[in-house]
């Protein structure tokens, strides 16, 4: 049974029962970011400001605070759609939690490399048959409520063991620290959370609403 939750503009996609999994040492993390799209292709060439720092800060927080294993960081023209589809067992499905920051829309997350498609929709991803449990897509409209719910684009095929996708319903503003903020709510830095579900609620309330940042 698929359960669907909408928290303001943050849409949480959950498969099966809600699992309040404690973030602990010996987990693996990986990050993708596309800030510079000018990879000599016909893909989008506009920059995504602070995307690399945002993803890097997320990964660093979990590695330095909780001892996560940093399995990969793929940036700019090194990041490929194939890392999510086809070679996912080497990248996003080879870690417990993965973070992507870059352009996106209702059709999916955007890449700039000519080695794969420019856009990777959720419908092409089949995740969780390896290690991935938690996927964070810090991109505009990738979990747009109208597109997914009312236009029936619910990504059931994406979940092959994946627990949850975090993403934006609306536009997302540029930030170098949103990833770190999310990780700190998750790792208990603020003394309020040690679980990803609780972290997502805290991140939404304390970061987006109170400071009016994020989509």
Image (cartoon, rainbow, N blue to C red):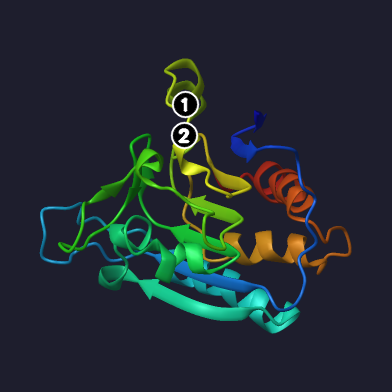
Q: Residues within 10 Å of mark 1 (few under 14, many from 20)?
A: some
Which part of the image, by quadrant, shows the C terminus? top right
Q: Position of residue 110 (x, y in %)?
A: 31, 51
Would residue 150 be seen by someone viewing this image from the given angle?
yes
Q: Quadrant of residue 97?
A: bottom right
Q: Position of residue 197 (x, y in %)?
A: 75, 48
Name the residue tied to disc 1.
148
Name the residue tied to disc 2.
155
* Mark toward the viewer: 1 or 2: 2
Q: Is disc 2 placed on a helix, strand or loop? A: loop
User: Compared to 126, does 53 lie above or below?
Assistant: below
Q: Is residue 212 left or right of residue 188?
A: left
User: Compared to 175, does 172 lie above or below?
Assistant: above
Residue 122 versus residue 202: which sits nearer the camera?
A: 122
Question: Disc 1 and disc 2: Cα gap in Å?
Answer: 8 Å
Residue 15 versus residue 10: which sits nearer the camera?
A: 15
Q: Residues within 10 Å of mark 2 (few under 14, many from 20)?
A: some
User: Contact (CB < 8 A) between labels 1 and 2?
Assistant: yes
Q: Position of residue 203 (x, y in %)?
A: 71, 51
Q: Quadrant of residue 34?
A: bottom left
Residue under the image location 67 percent in, 30 percent down = 5
Residue under the image location 71 percent in, 49 percent down = 200
Q: Position of residue 31 (x, y in %)?
A: 48, 68
Q: Is residue 26 left or right of residue 107?
A: right
Q: Seen from this angle, which residue lies furthest front?
A: 129
Which numbered marker is on residue 158?
A: none
Q: Is disc 1 placed on a helix, strand or loop? A: helix
Residue under the image location 24 percent in, 62 percent down = 37
């Amino acid at each position: 049974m698929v359960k669907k939750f909408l928290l303001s503009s943050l849409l949480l996609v959950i498969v099966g029962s809600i699992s309040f999994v404690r973030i602990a040492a010996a987990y693996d993390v990986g990050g993708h970011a596309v800030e510079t799209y000018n990879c000599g292709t016909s893909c989008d060439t506009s920059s995504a400001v602070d995307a690399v720092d945002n993803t890097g800060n997320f990964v660093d927080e979990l590695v330095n605070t909780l001892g996560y294993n940093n399995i990969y960081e793929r940036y700019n023209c090194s990041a490929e759609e194939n890392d999510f589809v086809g070679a996912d067992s080497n990248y996003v499905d080879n870690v417990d939690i993965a973070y992507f920051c870059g352009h996106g829309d209702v059709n999916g997350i955007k890449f700039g490399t000519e080695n794969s498609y420019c856009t990777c929709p959720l419908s092409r991803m089949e995740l969780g048959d390896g290690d991935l449990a938690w996927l964070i897509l810090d991109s505009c409209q990738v979990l747009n409520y109208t597109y997914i719910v009312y236009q029936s684009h619910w990504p059931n095929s994406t979940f092959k063991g994946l627990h949850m996708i975090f993403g934006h319903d609306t536009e997302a503003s540029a930030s170098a620290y949103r990833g770190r903020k999310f990780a700190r709510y998750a790792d208990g830095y603020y003394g309020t959370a040690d679980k990803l579900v609780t972290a997502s609620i805290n991140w939404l309330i304390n970061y987006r609403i109170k400071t009016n940042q994020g989509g």
